[in-house]
Amino acid sequence: MVAIKAHQAQSFLNPPGPKVPAVLFYGTDAGLVSERAAQLAKLFAKRDQGEIIRLDDGDLDNDPDRLIVELQTIPMFGGSKVVRATAGRRINAASLQPLLAEGALAANLIVEAGNLKPTDAMRALFEKSPHAAAVACYGDEAADLEGLIRETLKAHGLAITPDAREMLLARMGADRALSRGEIEKLALYAAGRGEIEAADIEAVVGDASEMAIDRTLNAAVSGDAASAMAEFSRAMAAGESAQMIILAVQRHLQRLHRIRTQIDAGASFDDAIRQQRPPVHFKQKGALGLQCRLWNSERLTAALARTAKTARSARLSSSLEEAIAEELLLYLAATARPGAPTRPLTAHRH
């Protein structure tokens, strides 16, 4: 019966690892949940000489008894399996409760979940069971980020100047996996140089806030509802404002409408991009190209009207702004979904 607070998590994961066979990782930081689950899975597998098995709802849709079988079957050649599962429709408190209540696990179980309230059945099950533990995973504090920077750069044989460290910390978000990815990218950029300077940060590392918003709106306008919702959740967990995301969507659609209108008037996509002010960042060109193929001017006009209405609603009902923003993102993804009427990137000339 263990509830591990966020600041206790790292010591809980130190070798030889926890004594309980079942551990739940949950919280607002999806990257940190995944990273810690992977860390513990490797620790369990090495300690108990077992293989790691990944399961989610899709696996149980095909074989409903798979989770129970994996958790209760003793490997023929010894050792102990590690079952790393993602919480969902089938992998839930109801399905796990009998196994934890009876202490009937023949394998180590790791479950990954999103942010769970104290009253959530899954969290309560792992916190109250004598055979389990629940570990909270929330966004990195500055001290945690400094440790992550130091650890990652040291592995690449790199130092960093104080100015560069301050700039890097300012650009990091609350999602650990995304932060690690940015630091790894920086390390590759500076490979062989010995020390990272502020100019390197400026050249390579984007602002986490801007990137989170860009990923959210690009997924929605490109028709990827699942990614849009995942990125929106990450942005909210990192402290972004739903109203800021709505305004960013509005600006993006306005630019897309201008590009689409110029293409309809006979301009090539590249010419339309070159005419934009402020200039289009080269990393955005691919996404805009896809979106121009998915959207025509009429639907962009309708989407802009819908977005303006959404922005007003969010201002008037700030307590509901997240739900209002989610509804807008889902509408955009549905409207942009491939199969809807599209126009070519070069207008037909008559």
Image (spheres, rainbow, N blue to C red):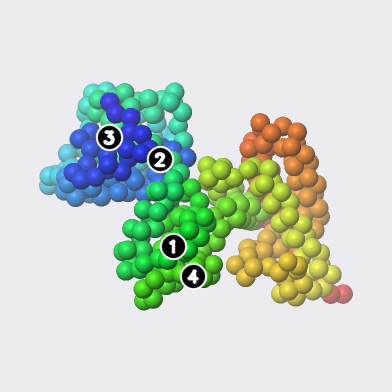
| Label 4 – label 2 distance at C-alpha | 30 Å
Task: Say which residue appears at 42% left-offset and 69% top-offset.
Answer: 196
Residue at left 44%, top 40%? 138
- Label 3 to label 1: alpha-carbon separation: 41 Å
Residue flagged by tag 2: what amino acid is it?
Cys
- Label 4, secondary structure: give it: helix
Give residue 335's mark. none
Q: Which residue is mark 3?
A: 22
- Discs 2/3, front: 2
- Give percent across and percent down for residue 339: 67, 55
How many C-alpha atoms fall within 10 Å of the one at disc 4: few (<14), some, or many (≥20)?
some
Query: Crowdedness of circle 3 by 10 Å Cα count: few (<14), some, many (20+)?
Result: many
Question: Which of 159/130 is in front?
Answer: 159
Q: Residue furthest right?
A: 350
Kind of residue indicated by mark 4 = Asp
Residue under pointer 4: 200
Report which residue position mark 1 lands on. 162
Q: Which circle, 1 or 2, is nearer the viewer?
A: 1
Q: Amino acid at mark 3?
A: Ala
Tag 2 residue = 137
Q: Position of residue 114 (x, y in %)?
A: 45, 38
Q: Is the residue under label 3 in contact with that under label 2 (CB below 8 Å)?
A: no
Q: Judge from the rendering whether residue 32 lies leftward or rightward of residue 328; answer left or right.
A: left
Compared to residue 241, the image places residue 95 above or below, namely above
Residue 89 percent coordinates (x, y): 45, 34
Q: Marks 2 and 3, how far apart in space?
A: 16 Å
